[in-house]
Image (cartoon, rainbow, N blue to C red):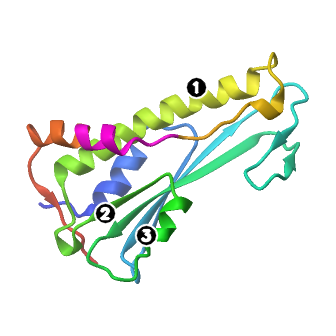
């Protein structure tokens, strides 16, 4: 039985074992998937935190949210300007979807991002030796590292994950 891209993402994200939130949103009209990543962590001490818009937050626990867009490269509705709104924008090829190697690499690389993100966020919130306004936290996605992992997986993983409505 052939697994669709949607089934693969749904199952794969559920099996990552991330202790935060991972939500998969499927927009059938625009042929996109959005993976919302939410870190929630208790803030210790009296840190003064600013979000990206400059608003202060004293909420506890602190929630940090970022998203990955997976889009149909054959769909003309997608606007490249949106890419600044996402941690990463990753294309799939219409009804052909992804090669399974790309899907496996995506989940593996996402797990690395989640683990390093959790560690970096804990460090960010526990670092009391530096002035709060000098600290910055954000997730980082390396397109080069991701594509290198895809090439590595293509050596051992075959098959496709078609986009099915």
x and y, in percent, of residue 97 in the image? 21, 66
The residue sitting at 69% across, 35% down in the picture is: 136
Of labels 1 and 3, earlier in sequence is 3
Quarter assignment of residue 109 = top left
Magenta-highlighted residues: 140-148
Of labels 2 and 1, earlier in sequence is 2
Picture layout, residue 156 above or below residue 35: above
Read off the residue under disc 1. Answer: 119
The residue sitting at 27% across, 42% down in the picture is: 105
Q: Nearer the viewer, mark 1 or mark 3?
A: 3
Of labels 2 and 3, earlier in sequence is 3
Q: Residues within 10 Å of mark 3 (few under 14, many from 20)?
A: few
> Label 1 to label 3, Cα distance in Å?
31 Å
Compared across the picture, whether 115 is left or right of 20 comes to: left
Residue 156 vs residue 150, the one in the foreground: 150
* Magenta stretch encompasses residue 21: no
Read off the residue under disc 2. Answer: 91
Picture layout, residue 106 above or below residue 123: below
x and y, in percent, of residue 34 in the image? 46, 63
Residue 29 vs residue 82, the one in the foreground: 82
The residue sitting at 40% across, 41% down in the picture is: 142
Compared across the picture, whether 20 is left or right of 24 comes to: right
Name the element at disc 2. strand
x and y, in percent, of residue 35 in the image? 47, 57
Read off the residue under disc 3. Answer: 80
> Which quarter of the figure is the N terminus placed in?
bottom left
Name the element at disc 3. helix
Q: Residues within 10 Å of mark 1 (few under 14, many from 20)?
A: few
């Amino acid at each position: 039985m052939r697994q669709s891209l949607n089934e693969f993402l749904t199952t794969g994200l559920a099996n990552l074992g991330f202790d935060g939130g991972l939500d998969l949103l499927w927009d059938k009209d625009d042929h996109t998937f959005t993976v919302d990543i939410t870190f929630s962590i208790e803030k210790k001490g009296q840190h003064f935190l600013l979000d990206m818009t400059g608003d202060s937050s004293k909420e506890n626990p602190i929630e940090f949210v970022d998203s990955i867009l997976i889009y149909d490269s054959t769909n003309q509705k997608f606007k490249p300007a949106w890419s600044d709104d996402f941690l990463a924008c990753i294309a799939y090829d219409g009804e052909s979807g992804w090669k399974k190697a790309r899907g496996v690499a995506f989940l593996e690389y996402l797990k690395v991002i989640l683990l390093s993100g959790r560690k970096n966020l804990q460090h960010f919130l526990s670092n009391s030796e530096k002035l709060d306004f000098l600290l910055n936290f954000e997730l980082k996605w390396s397109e080069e590292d991701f594509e290198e992992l895809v090439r590595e997986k293509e050596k051992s993983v075959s098959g496709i994950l078609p986009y099915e409505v």
